[in-house]
Amino acid sequence: VKQATPQALSFLDEALAQARVEGLLRVRQAPPPPGRLCLCSNDYLGLADRLAPAEMTGAGSSRLVAGDRAVHRELEAAAADLVSQPAALVFTSGYAANVGLLSCLAGPQDLIVSDALNHASIIDGARLSRAHVRVVPHLDVEATARALADPPPGRAFVVTESYFSMDADSPDLAALRRVCDAHGAALLVDEAHALGVLGPGGRGLCAQAGVLADAVVGTFGKAFGAGGAFVAGCESLIAWLWNRARSFVFSTGVSPMVAAAALDGLRRAAGEPGRREAVLSRATRLRAGLAARGLRVLGHGPIIPWVVGEPRRAVRFAEALVVRGVDVRAIRPPSVPAGTARLRLTVTAALTEADVDHAIAAVGAALAESAGWPGA
Ligand SMILES: Cc1ncc(COP(=O)(O)O)c(C=O)c1O
């Protein structure tokens, strides 16, 4: 049974019906069955089924030409289920997912309201759409409402991440949903850094807030350990992406091998909850240990940003940690605003409690050493 299209995306049904009437609706295309000559693949050297370790290494072409495989659909069903949306579409990366989604949903008459710290792929997708873009201060729901109050003539979209990877903070998704509903705007949420780790069963922060977004972006290259990404939403949205998301239509399908790895990652994340519990408890331990040493650590969850200010200082701290056996990377402008260079400590389930304690001690020692640095 086809699920209802959210009101804010109902324009897609009309456009899809029109494409169907014109014979322009795109559908998935499997490779030729055995016994049929394949003259429809870009697998020029015939390597796609031969590379170690797995069979089915390459999709051979776009999924609209001949690259669609059962594993893609299995992965899409699992991704949709993860975020409790009716359907999903797999992209080769989160970058491609955001660019494809935004550039084919919004047009020059429309408005995209975007959080100031949204990821580059969201910014680029918004630019490609040629919509009016209003950038609102980070996490500012009231500014979002104001931006929607006086829109251009077209449709409106609000786009945010659910867990910002540079600041480890999160928007009030329930409040954003209310604001979107009040203004007939669609809510698009990138859960790249949340899925697999945050929210009930690792199902993300929309699930935690009890919010149904109009589109959810997730990646398989972060918590799920593989690569590729997806957009999930109503069936009309997914049909629209099949037809219009240029980063999907004009791109070779995700390698079936990567898709199989991603599916395995999703299943293991769900079936081995101890991993999620471990990462969250280690993160809590690290936060507490750093705070006890007087550090102002930001946010929540597995990412722990420690803002030190100047880029040289961030690099110096990173070096001081490396010599103590702790590898933390310095994040500098333009990845973060000028004057907010930081060390981003990212906790994984692979760390033991002893590892965390070692890291806390190393930070403490680096801090003590920094008192003697020039300009300290
Ligand atoms: C919020 C967000 N969205 C999308 C992406 C892109 O995902 P991918 O690495 O799969 O291209 C990233 C990071 O890489 C991200 O942080």
Image (spheres, rainbow, N blue to C red):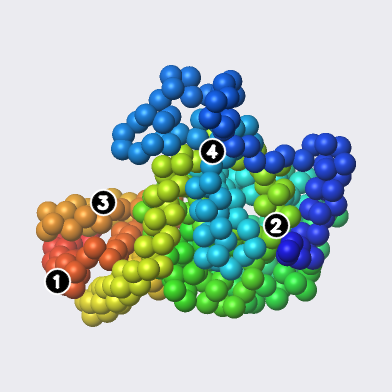
Q: Is mark 4 within 8 Å of ligand 1?
A: no
Q: Does the residue labelled 3 lie within 8 Å of ligand 1?
A: no
Label 3 element class:
helix
Q: Badge 1 local density, few (<14 within 10 Å), some, or many (20+)? A: few
Circle 3 residue: 315
Three-letter amino acid code of the residue under disc 3: Val
Circle 2 residue: 235
Q: Which of pointers 3 and 4 indicates the residue nearer the eye?
A: 4
Residue 323, position in %: x, y?
A: 12, 54
For residue 193, what is the image quadrant? bottom left
Alpha-carbon span between mark 3 and mark 4: 39 Å
Circle 4 residue: 253
Label 4 element class:
loop
Three-letter amino acid code of the residue under disc 4: Gly
Alpha-carbon span between mark 4 and mark 1: 42 Å
Q: Is residue 354 above or below residue 259?
A: below
Closer to the chain start, of discs 1 and 3, is 3
Residue at the image point whose x is 19% and y is 69% from the top: 352
Q: Is residue 191 left or right of residue 178?
A: left
Closer to the chain start, of discs 3 and 4, is 4
Q: Badge 3 local density, few (<14 within 10 Å), some, or many (20+)? A: many
Q: In this rendered view, identify the residue nearer to me: 102 or 263.
A: 263
Q: In this view, does 154 lie to the left or right of 276?
A: right
Report the quarter where the C terminus lies: bottom left
Three-letter amino acid code of the residue under disc 1: Ala
Residue 230, position in %: x, y?
A: 55, 52
Given the current orientation, which residue lies at the most extreme front position?
Answer: 35
